[in-house]
Image: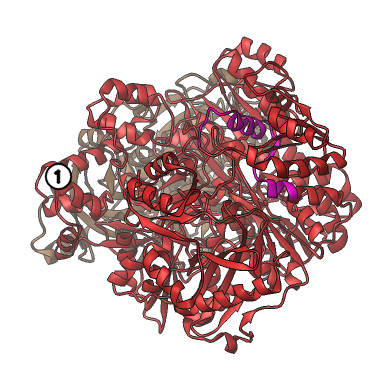
């Protein structure tokens, strides 16, 4: 069936801010889909509140709205833009829910808008627990015994009939929010109550627990003619019980015979056919490990995280094909872009093995529970490809960038066999290392399998890796042994450690014996057809098939690896734009990255894609083959920057700012010298390695001080210390990992925090604008509300910042991007830090000023001057809009995480509020972040003593808005003394009613809780904050944020928002 | 022990020896299925060939003997990238190494199977030798390799005597329906059919040209009584049994070598008994009715080929295993017209015979290994027998 001629203008809904369970994969899917629609001549209107995404670029869609994703906003947008169709299946659960609401309310019908890609009936059949169950029953596909309940009593009664344990799944939530496994009535009641509240429709599915079964997924495509194919199947190494987003996943399935494989494949096709899905769909099964019994776990009637993974694992562009199907094409009409010979109706077949590992945020939230459950906790993931499973696993491990390079990276050698048996019961991110240790201690496969339910095939593969460790340690390193170790993807560094040789010796021995990496192609067809797309992965012991090219100019762009807190999708935005800009300038471009969720790892972004770990050795393999004329590291976050030195040793010129200048910005002494020379003040401080030295510096400067490691992103490990004891605590945390770089101790200055991103060509500097943070210093810039243009600074401060930026960029010989953070105290400006590279705010500032700074930076790196590019150097005039970037957190997903804001970044994503007035922009920003108040007009205030004064003013303003204020004893007293009506409420351990009772009563809009310093988990404040988050109550830990919210509330709810097309800026 | 795979073009792959300790010369082909290696090994259509699996990890779930598609292993040799050290599956009762030795089949592991596949893709299917002797005189070996032909292997793979299978009585009103809870929890496979027709009481002759067991199983599951005949059975003998329908099975080798069978099929064609043919059977029916076949460069072997039903426009993913194909250019539309085509390369995947109750397909609706999407064709066959009987 050819394209539907009635589809001319399509509204595509994005997925909003990045949160756990809904991450960069939707930028990838959305971007691919928009390009695919535009290719067909369709006008694309895009809406997404997330400014860090590539999909919100004006070259991706025709009209771009970075607006809050609410029904109201979408209705106004539809009225304004009058699209004929809406495509909601590419924006994750958020997009799908919005599409559903618009359809259900009749709005789409009354505005003659067609829902593309799926129908409301389909979505309901797949998403509504009861309808789904009924549908499965109708076509004879088994589900685990279950009941949808709307109250706790029914849940308990039902569970008593089917027995514990049971799994709880709230309807219409993403990433399994609020779900869990209950082993007894107490747990059931707790999880159920929480889940009922989080569900959009107040429903939770109580289900027979099938934990321990194999978890298998199929990615399925179906077109409007009913043609179906499966793109790929995947097997979770972690059996049912761990969210697939947190599981180690392998593609294709490894332990299924053709009988099981086809049984589930046929079931998946039956399901998609019955649901009448047009587009992509993900079906999850639980398969009994010792029978053919299976259960359908769930179906996602849209593109998903798994479909992004399947796309990268096979080379089959699911989102692109889904978009074409939405326009009316059938699978046999859509060409497979990889082969150019086959069609989208051809099922990919793999001749390699893919392993995905989750990037979990426990290094950020050290107090959080590391246990993995049905609620997803990973912020991102890595994927690796090899022609053997062991190699793929080893590559995935080192791609994580979590100080892990082998199965020995966590040391459990102290554990006895009994300890290990105990420890194996715990399902957490370290389980695979525990399994390895159990094998080292001689535990048999059956015992490990009985406890973990991990299939013995995988256990044996882990054993093969363990045996290799032992062989390397105990025997002579022969050429044969080295060959085998490399085939299993042991890095040279690990082989060196185990054999007691140096890395250089190992590398030499490899080269002497021709043991070098070969590159194979991902071609969707296992070499059956010649493929046109250079998408490569490395293996050892095979023939190289990567085609050597010798273009005039060739550049290596290093990606930013897995999405983690502090290094998000923003850096992928930068990498992709840099690649496009290099391409435009006539370069052959090569991207190296390992993140399957990103646009940069789409096979048609760069001329060549190497899906590889970003370690020096892995990159060197590529460099030896490709011999690029230069590498660019300033766009790939810290991941790429860390490779600078290694690249230089390989003889690859670093394009743009030189490595020694990057060092000068990070090295305390060198940087101090530059500041002195340029006459720029900064907070006094010193460099230290040990706690003793740190205490000495701190006492010299006087507390409070800021403690932080150098060469990190997102303020990892950064803390404000108030006394010697805290210094000791923080230093211990930082020094858990070997530090190659010193630790910085600075006097803590409290002032207004300001930030610029700029492009420098060595002579001139272009500053698109100055951003001001709402939260004062001490809160990480990534967690602060950021306002452009800076609303409260004087012209003098503005000029000083422009001048300091110019001096710093020049002194550091910056060629390309630079990010500088300042503190202003009155008219005095201090520099906090300088990063001669791209930053988190680059996409945001580019979009709201209309100045494409990554493209400009790339041009400058190539050798152009700012003046040649049509820009007048210096600080650019302020835009006509206020654009406010609001951080978004995922605290509810991570049990036990401390939510109070501090110098270490904690947000997972961001959204934007853009408007002509500051107030409207602020309102939009809060709305986009999901803070839509007032609701019940009740709040709780509990602040530390130092904040009591400011809290009074805040209390007064809330009172004026008609809020009932509850406060803990001393806060209440302070408020009352100042004439603010506040009701005293007891602390947790006191008698009822306490703060806890109030929160659990679900009548509270907001908690304002400023924490006393320190990380004591048992403190009241911590519990109050956690309870607030877990019961879905907004919780603010900075009074500045509270003031901003008040400003927004005082201006009232905006019924009619002025929606701004970013493409016109 | 070291092993070598030597190709007709002089390429030598060095790997590790697996299976029986013997040297073979055979035609080297590749299969792109990611699972189902036992079904491949026991598919009689591979007689006279050595198979290379493009998926690199083979043997992961071991051997479940009940999944064998015929009485033995047929390929002359087995070529894999990596053989799993341990098998893991609840039904597993042997390893690949066990069965290769049992049926005296040699093999080679540890070679770059992707590089081999690329050679076969670019230069076309060629002969090769699997040996544990280091090749010294490559020219001599090449001579020997060039001389090898698959020959008429149908006579080797077909059954010796006719035998009968009684139709399943475990049918609901409309035939077997999948998904009922009674199958779950047992070690038995749930039938993969969604809703199949009831063919109870139908007498079907299956001409065994190297049939996979799942062809008969599909008919039996639908209630048909199946009699399996050796390949060279005369048309007269078959028709004397008064079957309601005739199935021509898949099988190995060049269809043009099956001259006797072709002569018999000519008579079956004239008989007006409904006929459904698969793979080799499809090619032989074409040859018997004046069409032509030719050898493809490297064939279709795998479980992911899209075929389009020209009558409905629907596309199905099919299981395939063939090196020869019917020449669509030279069809006489008064005799047969294309019914299915391959979406990728446009080759013939099925024919509808004009004015006859005969339809034939190149792919494998019986699956095993591979997708079960086209299993509905067995229903079409039953329907055809129904109509004929009513008439």
As drawn, the chain in red is A
**From what the image shows, is residue A904 above or below residue B98?**
below
Q: Position of residue B123 (x, y in %)?
A: 33, 67
Task: Please name whichever residue, A936 or A449, is drawn nearer the observer in this view of the structure.
Answer: A936
Q: Specify few, some or many for label 1: CA neighbours under 10 Å numbering under 14, 14-19, or 20 or more.
A: some
Q: Position of residue B148 (x, y in %)?
A: 23, 57
Q: Residue at x 44, y 56 (%)?
A: A712
Q: Is residue A1038 magenta?
A: yes
Residue A900 in view, yes or no:
yes
**From what the image shows, is residue A481 above or below residue A659?**
above
Q: Position of residue A161 (x, y in %)?
A: 63, 10
Q: Is residue A681 left or right of residue B162?
A: right
Q: How is the image coloured?
A: by chain
Q: Is residue B115 left or right of residue A790?
A: left
Write the start and end of the magenta stretch as one range. A1015-1043
Q: State the count of labels.
A: 1
According to the image, label 1 marks what residue? B22
Residue A351 in view, yes or no:
no
As drawn, the chain in brown is B
Task: Please name whichever residue, B27 or B301, is drawn nearer the observer in this view of the structure.
Answer: B301
Label 1 residue SS: loop
Q: Residue at x 40, y 24 (%)?
A: A425
Q: Position of residue B253 (x, y in %)?
A: 35, 51
Q: Residue at x 67, y 63 (%)?
A: A56
Output the chain of dot 1. Answer: B
């Amino acid at each position: 069936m050819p394209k539907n001629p009635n589809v001319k203008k399509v509204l595509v809904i994005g997925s909003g801010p990045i949160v756990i369970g809904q991450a960069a994969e939707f930028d990838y899917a959305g971007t691919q889909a928009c390009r695919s629609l535009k290719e067909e001549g369709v006008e694309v209107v895009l809406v997404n509140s997330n400014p860090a995404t590539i999909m919100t670029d004006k070259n991706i869609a025709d009209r771009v709205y970075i607006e809050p994703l609410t029904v109201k906003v979408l209705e106004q947008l539809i009225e304004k833009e009058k699209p004929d169709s809406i495509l909601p299946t590419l924006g994750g659960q958020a997009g799908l829910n919005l599409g559903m609401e618009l359809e259900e309310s009749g709005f789409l019908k009354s505005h003659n808008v067609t829902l593309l890609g799926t129908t409301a009936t389909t979505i309901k059949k797949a998403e509504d627990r009861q309808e789904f169950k009924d549908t499965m029953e109708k076509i004879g596909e088994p589900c685990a015994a279950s009941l949808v309940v709307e109250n706790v009593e029914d849940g308990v009664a039902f569970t008593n009939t089917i027995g514990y344990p049971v799994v709880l799944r709230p309807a219409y939530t993403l990433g399994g929010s609020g779900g869990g496994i209950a082993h007894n009535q107490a747990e059931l009641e707790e999880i159920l109550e929480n889940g009922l509240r989080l569900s959009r429709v107040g429903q939770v599915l109580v289900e027979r627990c099938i934990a321990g079964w194999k978890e298998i997924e199929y990615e399925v495509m179906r077109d409007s003619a009913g043609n179906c194919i499966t793109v790929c199947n995947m097997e979770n190494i972690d059996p049912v019980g761990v969210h697939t987003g947190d599981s180690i996943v392998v593609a294709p399935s490894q332990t299924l015979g053709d009988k099981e494989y086809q049984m589930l494949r046929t079931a998946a096709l039956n399901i998609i056919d019955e649901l009448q899905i047009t587009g992509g769909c993900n079906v999850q099964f639980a398969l009994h490990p010792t029978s053919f019994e299976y259960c359908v776990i769930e179906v996602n009637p849209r593109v998903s995280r798994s479909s992004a993974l399947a796309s990268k694992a096979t080379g089959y562009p699911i989102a692109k094909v889904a978009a074409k199907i939405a326009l009316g094409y059938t699978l046999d009409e859509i060409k497979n872009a990889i082969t150019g010979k086959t069609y989208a109706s051809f099922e990919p077949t793999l001749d390699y093995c893919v392993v995905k590992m989750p990037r979990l945020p426990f290094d950020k939230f050290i107090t959080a529970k590391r246990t993995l459950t049905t609620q997803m906790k990973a912020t991102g993931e890595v994927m690796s490809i090899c022609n053997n499973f062991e190699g793929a696993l080893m590559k995935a491990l080192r791609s994580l960038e979590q100080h892990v390079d082998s199965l020995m990276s966590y040391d459990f050698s102290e554990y006895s066999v009994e300890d290990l048996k105990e420890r194996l019961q715990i399902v957490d991110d370290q389980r695979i290392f525990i399994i390895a240790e159990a094998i080292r201690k001689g535990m048999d496969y059956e015992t490990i399998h009985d406890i973990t339910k991990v299939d013995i095939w995988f256990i044996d593969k882990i054993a093969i890796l363990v045996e290799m460790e032992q062989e390397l340690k105990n025997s002579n390193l022969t050429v044969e042994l080295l060959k085998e170790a490399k085939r299993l993807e042991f890095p040279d560094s690990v082989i060196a450690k185990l054999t007691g040789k140096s890395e250089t010796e190992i590398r030499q021995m490899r080269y002497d014996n021709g043991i070098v990496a070969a590159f194979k192609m991902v071609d969707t067809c296992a070499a059956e057809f010649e493929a046109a797309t250079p998408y490569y992965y490395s293996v050892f012991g095979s023939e190289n098939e990567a085609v050597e090219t010798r273009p005039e100019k060739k550049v290596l762009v290093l990606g930013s690896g897995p999405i983690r807190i502090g290094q998000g999708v923003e850096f992928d935005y930068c990498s992709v734009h840099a690649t496009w800009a290099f391409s435009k300038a006539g370069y052959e471009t090569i991207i190296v990255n390992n993140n399957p969720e990103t646009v940069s790892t789409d096979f048609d972004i760069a001329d060549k894609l190497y899906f590889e770990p970003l370690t020096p050795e892995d990159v060197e393999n590529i460099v030896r083959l490709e011999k690029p004329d230069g590498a660019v590291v300033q766009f790939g976050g810290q991941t790429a920057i860390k490779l600078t030195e290694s690249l230089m040793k390989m003889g690859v010129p670093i394009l743009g700012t030189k490595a020694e200048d990057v060092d000068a910005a990070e090295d305390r002494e060198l940087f101090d010298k530059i500041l002195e020379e340029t006459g720029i003040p900064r907070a006094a401080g010193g460099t230290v390695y040990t706690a003793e030295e740190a205490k000495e510096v701190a006492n010299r400067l006087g507390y409070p001080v800021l403690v932080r490691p150098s060469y990190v992103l997102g303020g990892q490990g950064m803390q404000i210390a108030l006394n010697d004891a805290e210094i000791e605590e923080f230093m211990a945390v930082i020094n858990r990992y070997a530090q190659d770089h010193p630790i910085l101790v600075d006097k803590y200055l409290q002032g207004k925090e300001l930030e610029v991103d700029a492009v420098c060509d060595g002579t001139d500097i272009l500053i698109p604008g100055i951003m001001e943070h709402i939260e004062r210093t001490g809160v990480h810039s990534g967690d602060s509300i950021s306002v452009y243009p800076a609303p409260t600074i004087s012209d003098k401060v503005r000029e000083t910042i422009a001048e300091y930026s110019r001096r710093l960029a020049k002194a550091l010989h910056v060629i390309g991007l630079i990010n500088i953070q300042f503190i202003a105290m009155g008219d005095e400006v201090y520099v906090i830090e300088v990063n001669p590279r791209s930053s988190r705010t680059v996409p945001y500032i580019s979009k709201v000023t209309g100045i494409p700074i990554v493209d400009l930076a790339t041009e400058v790196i190539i050798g152009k001057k700012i003046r040649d590019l049509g820009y007048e150097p210096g600080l650019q005039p302020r835009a006509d809009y206020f654009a406010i970037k609001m951080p978004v957190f995922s605290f509810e997903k991570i049990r036990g995480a401390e939510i109070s804001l501090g110098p270490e970044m904690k947000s997972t994503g961001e959204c934007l509020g853009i408007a002509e007035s500051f107030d409207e922009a602020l309102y939009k920003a809060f709305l986009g972040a999901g803070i839509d108040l007032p609701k019940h007009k009740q709040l709780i205030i509990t602040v530390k003593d130092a904040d009591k004064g400011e809290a009074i003013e805040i209390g007064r303003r809330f009172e004026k808005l008609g809020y009932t204020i509850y406060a803990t004893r001393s806060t209440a007293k302070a408020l009352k003394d100042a004439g603010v009506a506040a009701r005293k409420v007891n602390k947790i351990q006191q008698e009822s009613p306490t703060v806890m009772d109030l929160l659990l009563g679900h009548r509270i809009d907001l908690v304002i809780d400023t924490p006393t310093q320190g990380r004591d988990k048992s403190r009241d404040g911590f519990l109050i904050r956690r309870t607030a988050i877990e019961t879905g109550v907004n919780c603010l830990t900075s009074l500045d944020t509270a003031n901003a919210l008040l400003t927004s509330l005082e201006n009232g709810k905006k019924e009619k928002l002025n929606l701004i097309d970013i493409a016109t800026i | 022990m070291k092993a070598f795979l030597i190709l007709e073009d002089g390429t030598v792959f060095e790997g590790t020896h697996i299976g029986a300790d013997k040297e073979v010369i055979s035609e080297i082909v590749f299969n792109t299925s990611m699972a189902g290696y036992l079904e491949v090994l026991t598919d009689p259509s591979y007689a006279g060939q050595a198979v290379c699996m493009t998926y690199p990890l083979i043997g992961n779930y071991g051997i479940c003997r009940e999944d064998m598609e015929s009485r033995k292993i047929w390929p002359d040799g087995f070529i894999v990238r990596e053989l799993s050290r341990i098998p893991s599956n609840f039904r597993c009762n042997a390893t690949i190494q066990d069965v290769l030795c049992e049926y005296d089949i040699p093999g080679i592991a540890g070679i770059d199977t992707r590089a081999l596949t690329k050679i076969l893709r670019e230069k076309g299917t060629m002969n090769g030798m699997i040996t544990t002797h280091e090749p010294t005189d490559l020219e001599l070996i090449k001579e020997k390799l060039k001389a090898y032909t698959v020959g008429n292997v149908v006579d080797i793979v077909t059954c010796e005597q006719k035998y009968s299978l009684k139709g399943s009585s475990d049918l609901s009103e409309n035939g077997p329906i999948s998904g009922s809870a009674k199958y779950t929890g047992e070690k038995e496979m749930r039938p993969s059919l969604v809703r199949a027709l009831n063919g109870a009481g139908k007498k079907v002759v299956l001409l065994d040209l190297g049939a996979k067991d799942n062809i008969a199983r599909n008919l039996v599951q639908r209630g048909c009584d199946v009699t399996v005949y050796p390949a060279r059975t005369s048309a007269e003998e078959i028709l004397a049994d008064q079957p309601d329908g005739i199935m021509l099975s898949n099988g190995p080798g060049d269809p043009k070598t099956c001259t006797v069978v072709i002569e018999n099929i000519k008579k079956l064609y004239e008989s007006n008994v409904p006929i459904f043919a698969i793979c080799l059977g499809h090619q032989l029916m074409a040859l018997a009715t004046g069409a032509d076949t030719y050898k493809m460069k490297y064939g279709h072997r795998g479980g992911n080929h899209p075929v389009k039903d020209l009558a409905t426009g629907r596309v199905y993913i099919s299981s395939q295993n063939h090196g020869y194909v019917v020449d669509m250019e030279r069809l006489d539309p008064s005799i047969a017209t294309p019914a299915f085509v391959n979406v990728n390369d446009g080759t013939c995947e099925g024919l509808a015979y004009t004015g006859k109750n005969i339809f034939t397909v190149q792919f494998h609706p019986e699956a095993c290994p591979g997708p079960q999407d086209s299993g509905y064709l067995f229903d079409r066959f039953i329907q055809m027998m129904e109509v004929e009987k009513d008439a």
